[in-house]
Amino acid sequence: MEQITEPEMLRRAAAYCSTAERCIQDVQKKIKAAGLSQEEGERIIARLLQEKFIDEHRFARYFVNDKLRFNKWGRIKIAYELQKRNIPAPIRSEALEGIDEKEYADILQSLLKAKKKSTKGKDERDIYIKLLRFAAGRGFESREASRCLKQLFNGNDYEEDF
């Protein structure tokens, strides 16, 4: 296998960043896989940051938005995944603060409502606990999940399924 040059890797990394939002860690993995030295990798990353191909703030905002809307993850799981990608804490919290509270509650409510239909238990308390555990697995705060479940179990959702 032939060695990739630094200019060629810069071109490839720019193309990689152009297809979707990427964080520094994603690009570093690609550079390392190509076999470039650490110094070459740092120069490529610096150039991509300078030319706005990589922007951690932008990445975090889009990541939070996508994982909430499409994957239906809660704040805890999203924050953990951002941390795994080495996104700094101030950027993580800024991105998470951008979550609309009403939309967040609506997503959790619809998720729990759908899951309740397929959850079986010996009584309502057993189903409640299973749904609480399900919400926690999706990364939702137990306080928020509990509030939504109380609405579901008290019949306060006003959409009875027959």
Image: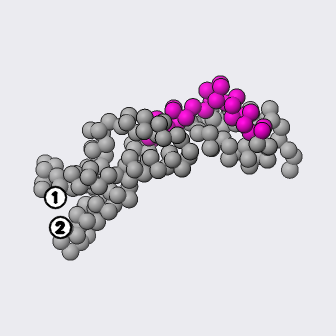
Q: Give coordinates of residue 2: x percent, y percent.
A: 87, 46
Rendered-image quadrant of the C terminus: bottom left
Whether residue 83 sits left or right of residue 144 in the image: it is: right
Measured along the vertical axis of the image, is residue 99 above or below residue 83?
A: above
Query: Dot 2 corresponds to which residue?
Result: 124
The answer to whether mark 2 and mark 1 are in CB contact below 8 A is yes
Q: Secondary structure at mark 1?
A: helix
Residue at the outermost bottom position: 122
Is residue 154 a member of the stretch shown in magenta? Answer: no
The image shows residue 161, relative to residue 48, as above or below, that is below
Q: Is residue 44 magenta?
A: yes
Q: Main secondary structure of the magenta part?
A: helix
- Residue 58: x percent and y percent? 51, 32
Instruction: Tell me which residue sits at (42%, 51%) in the image.
Output: 77
Few, some or many C-alpha atoms within 10 Å of disc 1 (few <14, some 14-19, many ≥20)?
some
Crowding around mark 2 (Cα neighbors within 10 Å: few <14, some 14 to 19, many 20+) is: few
Looking at the rendered structure, the kind of residue marked 1 is Phe
* Amino acid at circle 2: Glu
Give the magenta range: 39-66
Number of the label disc, if any, that sits on residue 101:
none
| Colour mapping | one colour
Residue at position x 61%, y 26% in the image: 52
Q: As drawn, which residue projects farthest toward the right?
A: 2
Residue 153 shows which numbered tag? 1
**What residue is shown at x 62% (from left), y 39% (from top)?**
24
46 in relation to 157, above or below: above
Q: Element type at marker 2?
A: helix
Instruction: Please provide percent x and percent y for residue 146.
Output: 23, 55
Q: Give how far across and how far down residue 89 sits, in percent.
A: 48, 41
